[in-house]
Image (spheres, grey):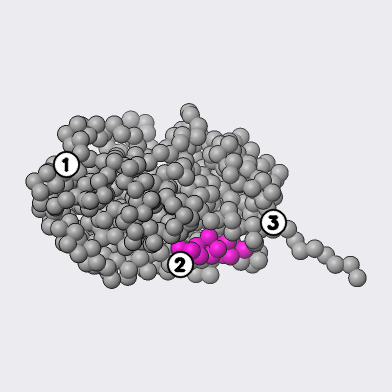
Amino acid sequence: MKTTSPKTKTLGLVITDGVGYRNFVLSRFPEQVPHSFDKIVVFSGLPASVYKGLNPTHFQIVELPVYRERKHNWFLRKLKEIAHLKKHRKHAGIRDGLRFNYRSGWRPNDVLVKTVYAITSLFHSEAAILFYESLQNRAFSRQQTVKTYGRLLDQHPVDLLFFTHQRPPFIAAVAAQAKQRKIKTASFIFSWDNLSSKGRMATTFDQYLVWSDLMKEELLEFYPRTSPEAVFVVGTPQFEPYVMERYTLSRNRAGEIHSQRESGALKEFLERFSLDGNNKIICYSCADASIGGNDVHVISKLMEGVRRGHLGAVEVLVRTSPAEGEERFAKLKQEFPELKWNHPYWELSREGHPEPWSQRIPTEEDLTNLRAVLTYSDINVNMLSTMSLDFMIFEKPVVNTAFGNEENGLYNDQRFLEYAHYKRVLEYQAVRLAKNEQELITHLKTYLKDPKTDHEQREALLKRQLGQPLEQISKKIVESLAQIVKRT
Protein backbone atom coordinates (compact mmCIF):
# COMPACT_ATOMS: atom_id res chain seq x y z
CA MET A 1 0.00 0.00 0.00
CA LYS A 2 1.37 3.37 -1.01
CA THR A 3 1.82 5.87 1.81
CA THR A 4 1.84 9.62 1.39
CA SER A 5 4.31 11.75 3.28
CA PRO A 6 2.91 14.52 5.45
CA LYS A 7 2.63 17.91 3.82
CA THR A 8 5.69 20.12 4.32
CA LYS A 9 4.85 23.12 6.47
CA THR A 10 6.51 26.43 5.63
CA LEU A 11 6.42 29.49 7.86
CA GLY A 12 7.00 32.95 6.46
CA LEU A 13 8.62 35.15 9.11
CA VAL A 14 8.60 38.91 8.49
CA ILE A 15 11.32 40.64 10.53
CA THR A 16 11.05 44.39 10.07
CA ASP A 17 13.75 45.85 12.32
CA GLY A 18 16.26 45.36 15.12
CA VAL A 19 13.55 44.78 17.73
CA GLY A 20 12.14 41.88 15.72
CA TYR A 21 15.66 40.55 15.26
CA ARG A 22 16.20 40.64 19.03
CA ASN A 23 12.90 38.92 19.78
CA PHE A 24 12.92 36.22 17.13
CA VAL A 25 16.58 35.61 16.27
CA LEU A 26 18.38 36.14 19.58
CA SER A 27 15.76 34.22 21.57
CA ARG A 28 14.97 30.49 21.63
CA PHE A 29 12.65 30.88 18.67
CA PRO A 30 15.19 29.63 16.05
CA GLU A 31 15.70 26.49 18.15
CA GLN A 32 11.98 25.82 18.62
CA VAL A 33 10.45 26.62 15.24
CA PRO A 34 12.01 23.66 13.30
CA HIS A 35 10.07 21.31 15.61
CA SER A 36 6.81 22.38 13.96
CA PHE A 37 7.85 23.75 10.55
CA ASP A 38 10.02 22.05 7.94
CA LYS A 39 11.09 25.35 6.43
CA ILE A 40 11.16 28.97 7.57
CA VAL A 41 11.43 31.75 5.01
CA VAL A 42 12.59 34.98 6.62
CA PHE A 43 11.27 37.98 4.68
CA SER A 44 13.60 40.61 6.04
CA GLY A 45 13.54 44.39 6.27
CA LEU A 46 17.18 44.07 7.38
CA PRO A 47 20.10 43.07 5.14
CA ALA A 48 20.40 39.30 4.64
CA SER A 49 23.99 39.43 5.96
CA VAL A 50 22.81 39.87 9.59
CA TYR A 51 21.41 36.32 9.77
CA LYS A 52 24.69 34.41 9.62
CA GLY A 53 23.87 32.47 12.80
CA LEU A 54 20.68 30.86 11.47
CA ASN A 55 20.85 27.25 10.29
CA PRO A 56 20.51 27.26 6.46
CA THR A 57 18.97 23.78 6.63
CA HIS A 58 15.79 25.29 8.08
CA PHE A 59 16.03 29.03 7.36
CA GLN A 60 16.02 30.78 4.02
CA ILE A 61 16.63 34.53 4.00
CA VAL A 62 14.78 36.72 1.49
CA GLU A 63 15.72 40.39 1.65
CA LEU A 64 12.78 42.73 1.02
CA PRO A 65 13.38 45.82 -1.12
CA VAL A 66 13.12 49.08 0.82
CA TYR A 67 9.64 50.59 0.67
CA ARG A 68 9.34 54.35 0.20
CA GLU A 69 5.84 55.61 0.85
CA ARG A 70 4.15 57.77 -1.77
CA LYS A 71 2.00 60.74 -0.80
CA HIS A 72 -1.23 59.04 -1.91
CA ASN A 73 -0.47 55.98 0.24
CA TRP A 74 0.51 58.22 3.14
CA PHE A 75 -2.83 60.07 2.93
CA LEU A 76 -4.86 56.84 3.01
CA ARG A 77 -2.78 55.48 5.88
CA LYS A 78 -3.34 58.68 7.84
CA LEU A 79 -7.09 58.48 7.27
CA LYS A 80 -7.10 55.02 8.81
CA GLU A 81 -4.82 55.94 11.72
CA ILE A 82 -6.51 59.21 12.69
CA ALA A 83 -9.98 57.66 12.42
CA HIS A 84 -8.81 54.97 14.87
CA LEU A 85 -7.53 57.63 17.26
CA LYS A 86 -10.80 59.57 17.07
CA LYS A 87 -12.86 56.46 17.69
CA HIS A 88 -10.87 55.60 20.84
CA ARG A 89 -10.08 59.11 22.11
CA LYS A 90 -11.43 58.35 25.59
CA HIS A 91 -7.99 56.83 26.29
CA ALA A 92 -5.34 59.34 27.40
CA GLY A 93 -2.58 57.92 25.22
CA ILE A 94 -4.83 57.99 22.17
CA ARG A 95 -5.76 61.63 22.87
CA ASP A 96 -2.07 62.50 23.02
CA GLY A 97 -1.63 60.89 19.62
CA LEU A 98 -4.44 62.98 18.19
CA ARG A 99 -2.90 66.17 19.54
CA PHE A 100 0.64 65.45 18.38
CA ASN A 101 -0.36 64.37 14.88
CA TYR A 102 -2.24 67.60 14.17
CA ARG A 103 -0.57 70.38 12.16
CA SER A 104 -1.37 74.03 12.82
CA GLY A 105 0.49 75.53 9.84
CA TRP A 106 -0.55 75.99 6.22
CA ARG A 107 2.16 74.28 4.23
CA PRO A 108 0.91 71.66 1.73
CA ASN A 109 1.52 68.79 4.15
CA ASP A 110 -0.21 70.69 6.97
CA VAL A 111 -3.27 71.17 4.76
CA LEU A 112 -3.35 67.45 4.01
CA VAL A 113 -3.30 66.66 7.73
CA LYS A 114 -6.13 69.13 8.36
CA THR A 115 -8.09 67.44 5.56
CA VAL A 116 -7.57 64.06 7.20
CA TYR A 117 -8.82 65.42 10.53
CA ALA A 118 -11.87 66.98 8.88
CA ILE A 119 -12.87 63.78 7.07
CA THR A 120 -12.35 61.57 10.11
CA SER A 121 -14.31 63.93 12.35
CA LEU A 122 -17.37 62.75 10.42
CA PHE A 123 -16.34 59.19 9.53
CA HIS A 124 -14.40 57.25 12.17
CA SER A 125 -16.44 54.10 12.76
CA GLU A 126 -14.84 50.68 12.48
CA ALA A 127 -16.54 50.31 9.08
CA ALA A 128 -15.00 53.60 7.92
CA ILE A 129 -11.56 52.55 9.16
CA LEU A 130 -11.77 49.28 7.24
CA PHE A 131 -12.95 51.18 4.15
CA TYR A 132 -9.87 53.42 4.31
CA GLU A 133 -7.76 50.29 4.67
CA SER A 134 -9.32 48.76 1.56
CA LEU A 135 -8.50 51.92 -0.40
CA GLN A 136 -4.94 51.76 0.89
CA ASN A 137 -4.58 48.12 -0.15
CA ARG A 138 -5.88 48.94 -3.64
CA ALA A 139 -3.41 51.81 -3.98
CA PHE A 140 -0.48 49.53 -3.14
CA SER A 141 -0.97 47.49 -6.30
CA ARG A 142 0.33 50.32 -8.48
CA GLN A 143 3.77 50.47 -6.83
CA GLN A 144 6.70 48.55 -8.29
CA THR A 145 8.21 47.74 -4.88
CA VAL A 146 4.91 46.23 -3.76
CA LYS A 147 4.70 44.16 -6.94
CA THR A 148 8.13 42.83 -6.04
CA TYR A 149 6.79 41.77 -2.64
CA GLY A 150 4.15 39.77 -4.49
CA ARG A 151 6.70 38.09 -6.75
CA LEU A 152 8.79 37.12 -3.72
CA LEU A 153 5.74 35.51 -2.11
CA ASP A 154 5.12 33.61 -5.34
CA GLN A 155 8.74 32.45 -5.50
CA HIS A 156 8.77 31.42 -1.82
CA PRO A 157 5.30 30.02 -1.00
CA VAL A 158 4.41 29.75 2.69
CA ASP A 159 1.51 28.35 4.71
CA LEU A 160 1.42 31.31 7.08
CA LEU A 161 2.99 34.77 7.03
CA PHE A 162 3.92 35.83 10.57
CA PHE A 163 4.80 39.49 11.22
CA THR A 164 7.02 40.11 14.25
CA HIS A 165 5.77 43.70 14.62
CA GLN A 166 2.34 45.14 13.88
CA ARG A 167 3.11 48.84 13.25
CA PRO A 168 5.74 49.57 10.53
CA PRO A 169 3.81 51.05 7.55
CA PHE A 170 5.49 48.93 4.87
CA ILE A 171 4.17 45.65 6.27
CA ALA A 172 0.67 46.67 5.15
CA ALA A 173 1.93 46.38 1.57
CA VAL A 174 3.38 42.91 2.23
CA ALA A 175 0.18 41.78 3.96
CA ALA A 176 -1.94 43.11 1.06
CA GLN A 177 0.02 40.94 -1.35
CA ALA A 178 -0.39 37.95 0.97
CA LYS A 179 -4.16 38.46 1.10
CA GLN A 180 -4.36 38.54 -2.69
CA ARG A 181 -2.73 35.11 -2.66
CA LYS A 182 -4.99 33.85 0.15
CA ILE A 183 -2.01 33.41 2.48
CA LYS A 184 -3.06 33.60 6.13
CA THR A 185 -1.40 36.36 8.16
CA ALA A 186 -0.59 36.64 11.86
CA SER A 187 1.08 39.37 13.88
CA PHE A 188 2.80 39.64 17.23
CA ILE A 189 1.93 42.67 19.39
CA PHE A 190 5.42 43.54 20.49
CA SER A 191 5.11 46.05 23.36
CA TRP A 192 2.94 46.52 26.43
CA ASP A 193 1.66 49.96 25.39
CA ASN A 194 1.09 49.40 21.66
CA LEU A 195 -2.67 48.87 21.81
CA SER A 196 -3.86 51.40 24.38
CA SER A 197 -1.37 54.20 23.69
CA LYS A 198 -0.48 53.98 19.99
CA GLY A 199 -2.37 54.31 16.74
CA ARG A 200 -3.87 51.78 14.36
CA MET A 201 -1.95 48.69 13.35
CA ALA A 202 -0.48 48.76 9.86
CA THR A 203 -3.24 46.47 8.62
CA THR A 204 -5.82 43.91 9.72
CA PHE A 205 -4.32 40.45 10.29
CA ASP A 206 -6.11 37.12 10.40
CA GLN A 207 -4.59 36.03 13.73
CA TYR A 208 -2.80 37.76 16.61
CA LEU A 209 -0.24 36.69 19.22
CA VAL A 210 -0.26 38.72 22.43
CA TRP A 211 1.62 38.80 25.74
CA SER A 212 -1.20 38.10 28.17
CA ASP A 213 -4.94 37.83 28.80
CA LEU A 214 -4.80 41.54 29.63
CA MET A 215 -3.45 42.35 26.17
CA LYS A 216 -6.04 40.06 24.59
CA GLU A 217 -8.79 42.06 26.31
CA GLU A 218 -7.29 45.28 24.94
CA LEU A 219 -7.02 43.92 21.42
CA LEU A 220 -10.67 42.86 21.38
CA GLU A 221 -11.65 46.34 22.60
CA PHE A 222 -9.65 48.25 19.99
CA TYR A 223 -10.33 45.79 17.13
CA PRO A 224 -13.94 44.71 17.80
CA ARG A 225 -14.31 42.64 14.64
CA THR A 226 -11.59 40.27 15.83
CA SER A 227 -12.76 36.86 16.99
CA PRO A 228 -11.48 35.83 20.45
CA GLU A 229 -10.43 32.51 18.86
CA ALA A 230 -8.05 34.45 16.59
CA VAL A 231 -6.00 35.73 19.55
CA PHE A 232 -3.31 33.55 21.16
CA VAL A 233 -1.73 34.36 24.54
CA VAL A 234 1.97 33.48 24.22
CA GLY A 235 4.04 35.82 26.41
CA THR A 236 6.84 37.89 24.86
CA PRO A 237 10.24 36.67 23.68
CA GLN A 238 11.93 39.97 24.56
CA PHE A 239 12.52 38.64 28.08
CA GLU A 240 13.59 35.14 27.04
CA PRO A 241 17.35 35.92 26.93
CA TYR A 242 17.15 36.32 30.70
CA VAL A 243 16.79 32.55 31.08
CA MET A 244 19.24 31.56 28.32
CA GLU A 245 22.71 30.42 29.32
CA ARG A 246 24.42 32.05 26.35
CA TYR A 247 23.71 35.52 27.78
CA THR A 248 25.29 35.04 31.21
CA LEU A 249 28.75 36.22 32.19
CA SER A 250 29.53 32.75 33.52
CA ARG A 251 28.21 29.22 33.13
CA ASN A 252 26.31 29.44 36.43
CA ARG A 253 22.60 30.16 36.54
CA ALA A 254 21.65 33.79 37.16
CA GLY A 255 20.10 33.05 40.55
CA GLU A 256 23.23 31.25 41.71
CA ILE A 257 25.42 34.08 40.51
CA HIS A 258 23.30 36.62 42.36
CA SER A 259 23.86 34.82 45.66
CA GLN A 260 27.62 34.61 45.16
CA ARG A 261 28.95 38.15 45.52
CA GLU A 262 32.53 36.85 45.14
CA SER A 263 31.84 34.97 41.87
CA GLY A 264 33.94 35.46 38.76
CA ALA A 265 30.88 36.72 36.90
CA LEU A 266 30.34 39.48 39.45
CA LYS A 267 34.01 40.44 39.24
CA GLU A 268 33.78 40.63 35.45
CA PHE A 269 30.67 42.80 35.68
CA LEU A 270 32.30 45.21 38.13
CA GLU A 271 35.41 45.49 35.99
CA ARG A 272 33.43 45.94 32.80
CA PHE A 273 31.66 49.02 34.18
CA SER A 274 34.37 50.23 36.58
CA LEU A 275 32.20 49.65 39.65
CA ASP A 276 33.22 49.16 43.28
CA GLY A 277 31.80 45.91 44.67
CA ASN A 278 31.45 47.43 48.15
CA ASN A 279 28.73 49.85 47.06
CA LYS A 280 25.06 49.39 46.26
CA ILE A 281 24.33 49.91 42.56
CA ILE A 282 21.49 52.11 41.34
CA CYS A 283 20.84 51.67 37.61
CA TYR A 284 19.19 54.59 35.86
CA SER A 285 17.81 53.38 32.52
CA CYS A 286 17.08 56.16 30.02
CA ALA A 287 14.25 56.58 27.57
CA ASP A 288 15.15 57.68 24.06
CA ALA A 289 15.48 61.41 23.46
CA SER A 290 11.96 61.77 21.98
CA ILE A 291 10.31 61.12 25.39
CA GLY A 292 13.28 61.13 27.75
CA GLY A 293 13.68 64.88 27.85
CA ASN A 294 14.08 64.90 31.62
CA ASP A 295 16.70 62.13 31.89
CA VAL A 296 19.66 64.51 32.28
CA HIS A 297 17.79 66.62 34.84
CA VAL A 298 16.73 63.61 36.94
CA ILE A 299 20.19 62.03 36.86
CA SER A 300 21.67 65.37 37.99
CA LYS A 301 19.28 65.54 40.95
CA LEU A 302 20.02 61.92 41.81
CA MET A 303 23.76 62.57 41.77
CA GLU A 304 23.40 65.66 43.91
CA GLY A 305 21.66 63.48 46.49
CA VAL A 306 24.46 60.91 46.25
CA ARG A 307 27.13 63.59 46.74
CA ARG A 308 25.34 64.92 49.81
CA GLY A 309 25.43 61.45 51.32
CA HIS A 310 21.66 60.99 51.41
CA LEU A 311 21.86 57.43 50.04
CA GLY A 312 24.97 56.08 51.73
CA ALA A 313 27.55 54.04 49.82
CA VAL A 314 26.04 53.82 46.35
CA GLU A 315 27.14 54.12 42.74
CA VAL A 316 24.96 55.07 39.79
CA LEU A 317 25.19 53.18 36.50
CA VAL A 318 23.39 54.84 33.58
CA ARG A 319 22.13 52.65 30.73
CA THR A 320 21.22 54.81 27.75
CA SER A 321 18.70 54.00 25.05
CA PRO A 322 19.96 51.93 22.10
CA ALA A 323 18.03 54.31 19.84
CA GLU A 324 20.51 57.18 20.35
CA GLY A 325 24.16 58.06 20.84
CA GLU A 326 25.99 59.66 23.75
CA GLU A 327 25.73 63.29 22.66
CA ARG A 328 23.06 64.59 25.02
CA PHE A 329 24.93 63.26 28.06
CA ALA A 330 28.24 65.05 27.38
CA LYS A 331 27.67 67.86 29.90
CA LEU A 332 26.43 65.38 32.51
CA LYS A 333 29.62 63.32 32.15
CA GLN A 334 31.73 66.42 32.77
CA GLU A 335 29.71 67.49 35.80
CA PHE A 336 29.60 64.04 37.42
CA PRO A 337 32.71 62.07 36.39
CA GLU A 338 31.89 59.46 39.04
CA LEU A 339 28.89 58.27 37.01
CA LYS A 340 29.30 54.87 35.33
CA TRP A 341 27.90 54.26 31.84
CA ASN A 342 26.44 51.43 29.80
CA HIS A 343 25.90 52.58 26.22
CA PRO A 344 24.12 49.72 24.41
CA TYR A 345 25.88 48.64 21.25
CA TRP A 346 23.45 48.03 18.41
CA GLU A 347 25.19 47.70 15.03
CA LEU A 348 23.96 49.76 12.08
CA SER A 349 23.32 47.12 9.45
CA ARG A 350 22.88 49.48 6.49
CA GLU A 351 23.33 53.13 5.54
CA GLY A 352 20.90 55.37 3.66
CA HIS A 353 17.67 53.77 4.85
CA PRO A 354 14.63 56.12 5.21
CA GLU A 355 14.24 54.90 8.83
CA PRO A 356 17.85 54.39 9.98
CA TRP A 357 16.86 53.49 13.57
CA SER A 358 15.11 50.37 12.23
CA GLN A 359 18.39 49.12 10.79
CA ARG A 360 20.19 48.94 14.12
CA ILE A 361 20.44 45.40 15.47
CA PRO A 362 21.42 44.34 18.99
CA THR A 363 24.57 42.36 19.60
CA GLU A 364 24.85 39.30 21.80
CA GLU A 365 27.39 41.25 23.84
CA ASP A 366 24.79 43.92 24.60
CA LEU A 367 22.22 41.35 25.70
CA THR A 368 24.86 39.83 27.97
CA ASN A 369 25.65 43.25 29.39
CA LEU A 370 21.96 43.99 29.93
CA ARG A 371 21.40 40.71 31.73
CA ALA A 372 24.40 41.41 33.98
CA VAL A 373 23.08 44.91 34.75
CA LEU A 374 19.72 43.41 35.71
CA THR A 375 21.38 40.70 37.80
CA TYR A 376 23.78 42.86 39.81
CA SER A 377 22.07 46.23 40.14
CA ASP A 378 20.25 46.72 43.42
CA ILE A 379 17.58 49.22 42.33
CA ASN A 380 16.32 50.60 39.02
CA VAL A 381 15.17 54.15 38.26
CA ASN A 382 13.44 54.96 34.98
CA MET A 383 10.81 57.20 33.45
CA LEU A 384 7.74 54.89 33.35
CA SER A 385 9.49 52.45 31.02
CA THR A 386 8.97 48.79 30.18
CA MET A 387 12.43 48.38 31.72
CA SER A 388 10.52 48.31 34.99
CA LEU A 389 9.36 44.82 34.04
CA ASP A 390 12.90 43.72 33.14
CA PHE A 391 14.17 44.61 36.61
CA MET A 392 11.14 43.08 38.32
CA ILE A 393 11.88 39.79 36.59
CA PHE A 394 15.19 39.87 38.47
CA GLU A 395 13.35 40.71 41.70
CA LYS A 396 14.69 44.26 41.84
CA PRO A 397 12.69 47.21 43.20
CA VAL A 398 11.88 50.03 40.80
CA VAL A 399 11.38 53.78 41.20
CA ASN A 400 9.62 55.49 38.31
CA THR A 401 10.13 59.21 37.75
CA ALA A 402 7.78 61.82 36.29
CA PHE A 403 9.25 65.20 37.20
CA GLY A 404 7.70 67.29 34.44
CA ASN A 405 4.27 68.89 34.18
CA GLU A 406 2.64 71.76 32.29
CA GLU A 407 3.75 74.37 34.85
CA ASN A 408 7.35 73.66 35.85
CA GLY A 409 9.09 74.04 32.48
CA LEU A 410 10.29 70.43 32.28
CA TYR A 411 9.19 67.95 29.63
CA ASN A 412 5.66 66.97 30.64
CA ASP A 413 6.16 63.29 31.41
CA GLN A 414 3.43 63.35 34.07
CA ARG A 415 0.88 63.13 31.27
CA PHE A 416 1.94 59.49 30.82
CA LEU A 417 0.53 58.71 34.27
CA GLU A 418 -2.95 58.62 32.71
CA TYR A 419 -1.99 56.14 30.01
CA ALA A 420 -3.93 52.89 30.44
CA HIS A 421 -0.90 50.58 30.48
CA TYR A 422 0.85 52.65 33.16
CA LYS A 423 -2.23 53.24 35.33
CA ARG A 424 -2.24 49.49 35.94
CA VAL A 425 1.32 49.68 37.29
CA LEU A 426 0.16 52.28 39.81
CA GLU A 427 -2.97 50.31 40.64
CA TYR A 428 -0.82 47.30 41.53
CA GLN A 429 1.51 49.56 43.60
CA ALA A 430 4.40 47.64 42.06
CA VAL A 431 6.69 50.68 41.87
CA ARG A 432 7.27 53.88 43.84
CA LEU A 433 6.54 57.02 41.80
CA ALA A 434 8.73 60.11 42.26
CA LYS A 435 7.48 63.46 40.96
CA ASN A 436 10.40 65.43 42.37
CA GLU A 437 13.89 65.09 43.84
CA GLN A 438 12.70 64.68 47.44
CA GLU A 439 10.37 61.82 46.57
CA LEU A 440 13.10 60.13 44.52
CA ILE A 441 15.54 60.17 47.43
CA THR A 442 12.86 59.01 49.89
CA HIS A 443 11.84 56.03 47.74
CA LEU A 444 15.45 55.03 47.10
CA LYS A 445 16.15 55.09 50.84
CA THR A 446 13.16 52.80 51.40
CA TYR A 447 14.35 50.26 48.85
CA LEU A 448 18.00 50.44 49.91
CA LYS A 449 16.95 49.66 53.47
CA ASP A 450 14.66 46.78 52.47
CA PRO A 451 14.71 45.66 48.80
CA LYS A 452 11.86 43.21 49.50
CA THR A 453 9.48 46.14 50.01
CA ASP A 454 6.60 45.85 47.48
CA HIS A 455 7.84 42.41 46.39
CA GLU A 456 4.37 40.83 46.34
CA GLN A 457 2.98 43.73 44.32
CA ARG A 458 5.75 43.36 41.75
CA GLU A 459 5.06 39.63 41.46
CA ALA A 460 1.35 40.29 40.94
CA LEU A 461 2.03 42.81 38.17
CA LEU A 462 4.43 40.46 36.39
CA LYS A 463 1.88 37.67 36.50
CA ARG A 464 -0.71 39.97 34.92
CA GLN A 465 1.59 41.39 32.24
CA LEU A 466 3.73 38.47 31.10
CA GLY A 467 1.22 35.72 30.49
CA GLN A 468 3.65 32.77 30.22
CA PRO A 469 6.72 31.40 32.07
CA LEU A 470 9.85 32.80 30.39
CA GLU A 471 11.24 29.33 29.68
CA GLN A 472 8.14 28.38 27.63
CA ILE A 473 7.59 31.49 25.50
CA SER A 474 9.16 30.49 22.16
CA LYS A 475 7.69 27.02 22.48
CA LYS A 476 4.25 28.54 23.04
CA ILE A 477 4.66 30.90 20.07
CA VAL A 478 5.63 28.06 17.74
CA GLU A 479 2.80 25.83 18.97
CA SER A 480 0.33 28.66 18.35
CA LEU A 481 1.63 29.26 14.83
CA ALA A 482 1.40 25.55 14.08
CA GLN A 483 -2.18 25.54 15.37
CA ILE A 484 -3.06 28.42 13.05
CA VAL A 485 -1.68 26.50 10.06
CA LYS A 486 -3.59 23.40 11.10
CA ARG A 487 -6.84 25.39 11.12
CA THR A 488 -6.40 26.60 7.54
Residue under the point 12% across and 44% down:
307
Dot 3 corresponds to which residue?
Answer: 38
Residue 471 forms part of the magenta stretch: yes
Marks 1 and 3 close (CB-CB < 8 Å): no
Mark nearer the N terminus (1 vs 3): 3
Image: magenta residue range: 470-482
Residue under the point 25% across and 55% down:
379
Mark nearer the N terminus (3 vs 2): 3
Mark nearer the N terminus (2 vs 1): 1
Secondary structure of the residue carrying tag 2 is loop
Residue 74 forms part of the magenta stretch: no
Looking at the rendered structure, the kind of residue marked 1 is Ser
Q: Magenta span: helix, strand or loop, mainly?
A: helix
Residue under the point 8% across and 46% down:
308
Dot 1 corresponds to which residue?
Answer: 300
Secondary structure of the residue carrying tag 1 is helix
Dot 2 corresponds to which residue?
Answer: 468
Neighbour tally class for label 3: few under 14, some 14-19, many 20 plus, Cα within 10 Å: some
Q: Give the quadrant of the N terminus.
A: bottom right
Q: Nearer the viewer, residue 302 or 12?
A: 302
Q: Position of residue 169 (x, y in %)?
A: 48, 44
Q: Nearer the viewer, residue 428 or 224?
A: 428
Secondary structure of the residue carrying tag 3 is loop
Looking at the rendered structure, the kind of residue marked 2 is Gln
Does the rendering let one see residue 326? yes
Q: Is residue 134 above or below residue 328?
A: below
